[in-house]
Amino acid sequence: MRLGVLDIGSNTVHLLLVDAHPGARPVPFASHKRPLSLVQYLDGDGNINDAGQHELTEFVLEAWEFAARHKADDLLAFCTSAIREATNGPAVLARVKHETTVTLQELTGSEEASMTFFAVRRWYGWGAGPVLNLDIGGGSFEMAFGQDELPEVATSVPLGASRLTRDWLAEDPPSAKSVKELRRYIRATLAPAVKQFEGLGRANMVAGTSKTFRSLARIAGAAPSAAGPYVKRELNATDLGVWAQRISAMKVEDRLFLPGVSDARAHQLLAGALVAEAALEMFKFKKMRICPWALREGLILRRLDQLVFAGPLDPAPHIGVPAAR
């Protein structure tokens, strides 16, 4: 069967179609995505403005038609912190449904962390033992720890790379003062979250999910994506610290010459590096593994598990004849 996951993130809106069945690994079939930083469309009151809402609904229509054209049997559509934390989030979701017929499910921060952890557990298996997973998004930073398929603790803090860049790093390149102040803010925000993990035991490994971690690992010498998902990729805290210092002195246009850095991510690379550096330091780990699966795969795998008990799916109501524009 063909499943689709429509992910409305803070940096990118992305539809992934996979072919899968219960008990099998999902195999990517096709994808359709577009850079869309909803954080950049926030007004002074924290509302996503009309231009941002228009861009979002246009993409959801495109994705809906793409899924129908490729005969998707089911479509999971969800949104994360960009809409979750917007003042007018409910109104935005209502507009999307009215104009596209697609219902976006709003994930809480803990749900986002839990489903990402679920994907990491499936990737590494039981042999990995206790796992700590870290995920840097555009609007938030998720952390989860556990020994089972779902985590014992899963939490989220507003330390997304795009959000921090907008609020703290306005200059290009940023001033030493702004970088120092951001470092202090990140650690102060992380401290109470990290405290929630005390007494749970030591993780056997730290996994990093998200494009930000993949980019940082690539810069530090990890294999490129062309080498495939099964190549072991790691990010060492020492290398991360060195590169955080280097990136802080670089203009955005110069970061584009670094391996694995795209136009859409270059501006927020430093903020992501500072969050990653602080997290490894505060959780007291010297390195992390880069996991190729994350939130989208977690939701797909969870949906497949449900089919074992629920039986075959009826077509989703928004898969079929495309809506009129």
Image (cartoon, helix red, strand yellow):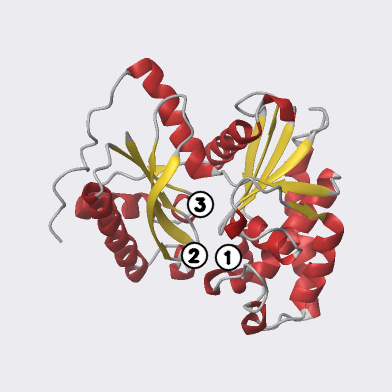
Q: Point out the image quarter for the N terminus.
A: top left
The mark nearer the N terminus, 3 or 2, is: 2
Tell me if mark 1 has few (under 14), some (14-19) or many (20+) residues whose alpha carbon lies within 10 angstroms of its own.
many
| Residue projecting furthest to the front | 227
The image shows residue 264, relative to residue 320, as above or below, that is below
Q: Name the residue under label 1.
A: 162
Q: What residue appears at the point 66 percent right and 70 percent down from the top-left corner?
A: 259
Asked which quadrant contains residue 198, the reply is top right
Tell me if mark 2 has few (under 14), some (14-19) or many (20+) residues whose alpha carbon lies within 10 angstroms of its own.
many
Q: Mark 3 points at which residue?
A: 81
> Where residue 164 appears, x then y in whole percent?
64, 65
Q: What residue appears at the point 20 percent right and 38 percent down from the top-left corner?
A: 317
How far is the residue under mark 1 from the one under mark 2? 7 Å
Q: Badges 1 and 2: C-beta atoms under 8 Å apart? A: yes
Say what secondary structure mark 3 lies in: helix
In the image, 189 versus 203, the foreground residue is 203
